[in-house]
Amino acid sequence: MRTKRARSPASSSSSARHRKSARGADTLSPRENAELRTVALKAKWVAAHLDGTLQPSLDAFNAKATARGRTRVLQVIKAAGSITLSVLVVVACVSCGIEKPLLPSHYVVNSEDEALESCPPGTEAFNNSTSYPCKTCWARKLAERDDTVDGRVRLLMKPYRRLCPPRASGFEQTPVGWFWWRWKEQGGAFDIVNTKHVITKAACCANTGAPILLTGRGMKDAFSPSVNNTDMSIKNPEDHVEPSTLLVCKETNVSQGDAMPVLADSWLCFMTASVRVATLVASEAGRAVLATERACEAERCSANLGNRNNKRANGVTAHSTKETAAYDKQCYELDMSTICRQATHSHKANDKKKGRDVSANITGDQMAERWIAQPWCALSGVLFTINNGPFRPSVDRVTHGVSHTANDTRLVCRILNCNPSWTRRTFVELLLAQTRVEVPPAARAALEAEIAEQ
């Protein structure tokens, strides 16, 4: 699509097209990149003004101003014995009408392949039209477009380029077409009103049977849709294909690995255990049984940790030097101290990689002590197991986006440590909404009362 351009003052020649600047632009955020390009462009215009190649075109630039894109030129400022350029050209956005500097920080450069640092002064081209206005208006237009059911589906399906519905389905052979076909296949329904999809019935999560909620408010809503691949050999989203791809609630879309090769089966086991805990908690006799089980598990954990220097007592049979790979594998599967040390080391390495402070990160010993003190999931109440599966403890941050500190973490079952939106309330709502395991009336009443109190 061709767009109207606002040209910077200098020559009226066509935009020079060059390769991207080799200044690490690919590693910068869009805002940082725009600021970098703005500084470079202003420096170039100052130099062009000083040598006389820019000034002659200022009057010509003003003469081209129109009602749709009114422009005005600010004078070059001389201060402290040097010439600096605060803002050279101000252009009124054709969408909002607000005058803003004609710079990459406010308007999109028409061709991102143009190197602003090297192309001739005045040949830079910027978008300023009703379709592509200033960056503020453009961001608002994107938000308005995406905050709809169809906008959310487009964003969700963007990475899955190869996903298409069966040709006989009658749906469009695109990732978006696959979504709507799969929505119906999983029990959902919708109407099309003025070319827009209107949800009339929620689809069912392939993992739990809970309703998938799709609104225009955003993908951060609880139980919003996610694309789950059941073929463990496929790693990249662009390689997802039918029939090994399903729609699930985003909270249940866990990174599987060897621990959970069949995710739906893992969720069935976990939901069964969670319903059992809820049933026991609902009666006094059940709470006594649960307390006994937790005490026994704490003793087993304490004994395992006490054998940290005698791993054979924990079932490790491989030789530490002659069978290193087998020894490491067995330690990771059977030895509690090794499991905790590796888990916390991994979190610390990731935090450090993201530039976070790791001085107060939780240690392996702290995780092990917490495991013994509370050998059950902080969200579900299900007992942990040492086996490498959905019930193994995992360090979960209470506050998303910060370091894994001892004061801001909790231990949850691995299958729950996949989404920052998990709370006790979210878990209880999922337990009540899932359809794969029946929740007894007494347990359901207790869970509903818990939600009502919050």
Image (spheres, rainbow, N blue to C red):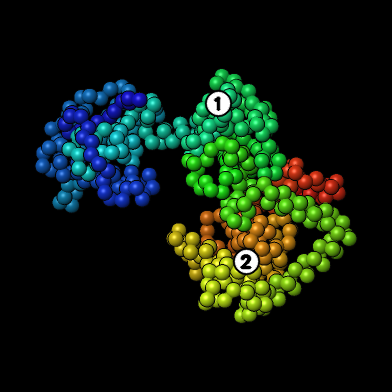
Residue 133: where, in percent of width, then height?
37, 30
The crowd level at tag 2 (other Cα within 10 Å; few <14, some 14-19, many 20+) is some
Residue at point 59%, 56% (across, down): 258
User: Marks 1 and 2, how far apart in space?
Assistant: 45 Å
Q: Nearer the viewer, residue 157 or 13?
A: 157
Helix, strand or loop at label 2? It is helix
Residue 348: where, in percent of width, then height?
51, 65
Helix, strand or loop at label 1? It is helix
Residue at point 56%, 69% (across, down): 326
Instruction: Find disc 1 in the rendering and name its residue.
Output: 167
Q: Residue furthest bottom?
A: 309
Question: In screen coordinates, is 382 left or right of 76?
Answer: right
Residue 4: where, in percent of width, then height?
31, 25
Quarter of the view holding residue 58: top left
Question: In screen coordinates, is 217 left or right of 74?
Answer: right
Q: Residue furthest left?
A: 51
**Amino acid on which disc 1 is placed:** Arg
All told, the count of numbered labels is 2
**Amino acid on which disc 2 is placed:** Glu
Q: Nearer the viewer, residue 86 or 192?
A: 192
For marks 1 and 2, the one nearer the N-term is: 1
Question: In screen coordinates, is 61 left or right of 69?
Answer: left
Quarter of the view holding residue 230: top right
Q: Nearer the viewer, residue 239 or 401?
A: 239
Mark sitting on residue 333: 2
Q: Is residue 327 visible?
A: yes
